[in-house]
Amino acid sequence: MRAPPAGQYSHERHGPSSDPVSRGHLLPRAGEGRAQTAWVLSDGRAGHEAQSLGIADAIGLSPRLIRLAPHGLIAALAPFGPIDPREAKLFAPPYPDLVIACGRRTIPYLRHVKRASGGAVFTVYVNRPASGLGTADVIVAPRHDGLVGENVIAPLAPANRLTPQRLAEARGALDPRVAALPEPRVGLLIGGDSRHFRFSERDAERLLAAIGAMLDDGWNIAATVSRRTPARLVEALRARLGGAHPTLADARAAVSRARETETRAFLWAGDGENPYLSILAGSQALVVTADSVNMVAEAAATGAPVHVFEPEGGSAKIAAFLDALEQRGALRRWRGRLEHWRYEPLNETPAIAAEIARRYATFRQAAPVLLHGSRAS
């Protein structure tokens, strides 16, 4: 799932969820210690943005999104260096009530806003910061990160934007390329090489064998890759899953004749819009590669059985995360065949948001008045 290009200031507001079960609708009303304005600082990575915006949604905020692109040495020094002076104008007052940031390159900017506001802005950092517990007023670090402190919230899984209503709406209006596939559908979410995992030739063979087993068992496959997926693996998937992409127009025409033409698979590999949400919402089972904690957590929010395919490598932290979700009943490791089981969809975002809102209300009782006499709009 791609994020828009970095290095731009978005004046677009990201509205809160209208989902009636969202915790944002259960928080104190304005004037009772509830944040009314917010900024989200982004390094441009889609997974980081999804976590930050998911928290803002659940609190009930419509934040301003600021995408940062520090250059050269300044980027290399983050999180310990200064902000890029070329981006300083993005942080002029009036300041918001709350700032949420994710990604090491956002940390100097988060601290800058805290200092410039005279300490009046409540700051939240998402994930474990290399700069320590003093990075923000609240740090949201998933439990497998092992971070402990009075200002730490440690959920089982990272935050996301997948509310029940959003998933239901996506199921009711599936992308035609996904809708063209008859049920049962399995969503195949493929990441790629990372610090901890490398997709070897053997892994590619194992993944292709898994695809063959799913097709042989009568499943139809909606697959998506990422920017990190090795090119050789993408080409192998193209060959196995049907080659070129259908256009949206072709897909719409195919929906009505899908069963007659035996449409069995679709692969998104970078052309056009990624139907990631439709794949999540419209699949009766999911297979996710273990390299992306965010993708695994988003899959577990659907309630569909989640199978984790583990390429070579790994880390103790990621293994602990997968073990915890397996104990929770949300996932199973891939064992050669799709399995069926039921579990309550796992989404920690509402609880994270409620705890941030509680801590914000406590902070606001003792915090200094925002400088310059007005709030951010």
Image (cartoon, rainbow, N blue to C red):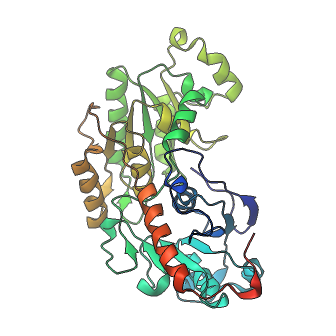
Between 367 and 179, the one lying in front of the other is 367
Residue 4, image x, y percentages: 68, 57
Q: Is residue 69 left or right of residue 302?
A: right
Query: What is the quadrant of residue 59 in the picture?
Result: bottom right
Q: How many marks?
A: 0
Between 368 and 51, the one lying in front of the other is 368
Q: Residue lying at the far top in this picture: please name it.
A: 260
Q: Residue at x 51, y 22 (%)?
A: 181
Q: Residue at x 74, y 67 (%)?
A: 8
Q: Residue at x 44, y 21 (%)?
A: 183
Residue 350, image x, y percentages: 45, 56
Q: Quadrant of the C terminus?
A: bottom right
Is the residue 36 above or below the residue 253 in the image?
below
Is the residue 74 above or below the residue 98 in the image?
below
Q: Residue lying at the far front in this picture: please name it.
A: 32
- The answer to whether residue 268 shows anywhere in this view is no
Residue 55, image x, y percentages: 52, 60
Residue 163, image x, y percentages: 50, 45
Query: What is the quadrant of residue 292 in the picture?
Result: bottom left
Q: Residue at x 38, y 45 (%)?
A: 300
Is the residue 136 above or below the residue 176 in the image?
below
- The answer to whether residue 139 shows anywhere in this view is yes
Between 80 and 102, the one lying in front of the other is 102
